[in-house]
Amino acid sequence: MSTYRTINPRVRRPSSVAKPRKSIGLTIAMGLFLAYALVPLGWLAINATKTQPDLFSGSGLAFGDSFALWDNIVQTFAYNDGIFLRWLGNTLLYVVVGAGGATLLATLAGYGLAKYAVPGRKAYFAVVLGAIAVPGTALAVPTFLLFSQLGMTNTPWAIIVPSLISPFGLYLIWVYTLESVPKELLEAARMDGASELRIFLTISVKLLTPGIVTVALFAIVATWNNYFLPLIMLSDPDWYPLTVGLNQWSQQASGVAAEPIFNLVLTGSLLTIVPIVAIFIVLQRFWQSGLSAGSVKG
């Protein structure tokens, strides 16, 4: 056979591993996208190392005469009796209670609607889809009026309670449960005498882990970056999250008694994104798995 292949040129030899196709246009597009994402972060990191005078004496993408990153960090935490640390604690409180509660409620509701015969399930599904389509800013003013009548404005509950509702998280868990939790597995566990709570905690939660982590990431980012709702709900700076607090510092540069502290605003902004980036790096593999789950059905 090998001799025949050698003397007969019409017989094609087994081709080697196919080389990946290259696209110059796609490479350029991805390069532009990468620059669009990284240049603002680079600008922020560079300018966080400058003093207040250096911010206006050179290019935004060039380092200043002195490297003052550590001094800026110390001043950020010490300014105004350490209010930045209070804002950081408030943000963590809103994320842990609000985003954590939203993940828990979305998991319970999505799993229940997917695996149990709930009356009116189709109506719930339509309501959830409709809620996803409504932007959060459109609900901010009605939410403020409601919480104002309840006397809950200017309290942490004005931020935590609205954060507990995540229609997108419920929908994601609902769909993910249908694809990742086999009905036969649940029936086998019931035949073995396991209770519904035990089935959920020992079997379903393990299968739903990628989806749960995905919902948690979206909830954490939404709560961490929440700006408009705290802006209209809170008037006491002691309850501000980082987003509103840093904006207050930025506004100190205008007015009669202007006190610009742009170096501290930039340093605080840099410190603000560090925890969220760390969370994404740690949970990235669960996030990718959760987004791709159910895309290919065996």
Image (tube, rainbow, N blue to C red):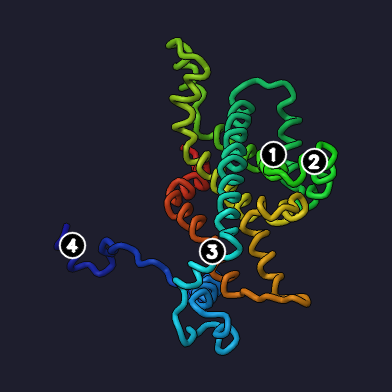
Identity of the residue furthest to the left in this view: 3
Identify which residue is drawn at 57% across, 89% down. Answer: 57
Q: Which mark is residue 161?
A: 1
Among the 4 quarters of the image, the one containing residue 110:
top right
Mark 4 or mark 3: whose residue is earlier in sequence: 4
Q: Real-space Cα distance between discs 2 and 4?
A: 85 Å
Residue type at mark 1: give it.
Val
Q: Which mark is residue 13?
A: none
Residue type at mark 4: give it.
Tyr
Identify which residue is drawn at 45% across, 26% down. Answer: 203
Residue at the disc numbered 3? 78
How far across and down, in percent of the image, does residue 167 sit?
68, 40
- The local secondary structure at tag 1 comes to helix
How far across and down, in percent of the image, does residue 162 sit?
71, 42
Residue at the disc numbered 4? 4
Residue at the disc numbered 2? 147
Q: Real-space Cα distance between discs 3 and 1?
A: 31 Å
> Label 1 near label 2: C-beta < 8 Å?
yes
Answer few, some or many: residues within 10 Å of disc 3's Cα (few below 14, many 20 plus, some between 14 and 19). Answer: few
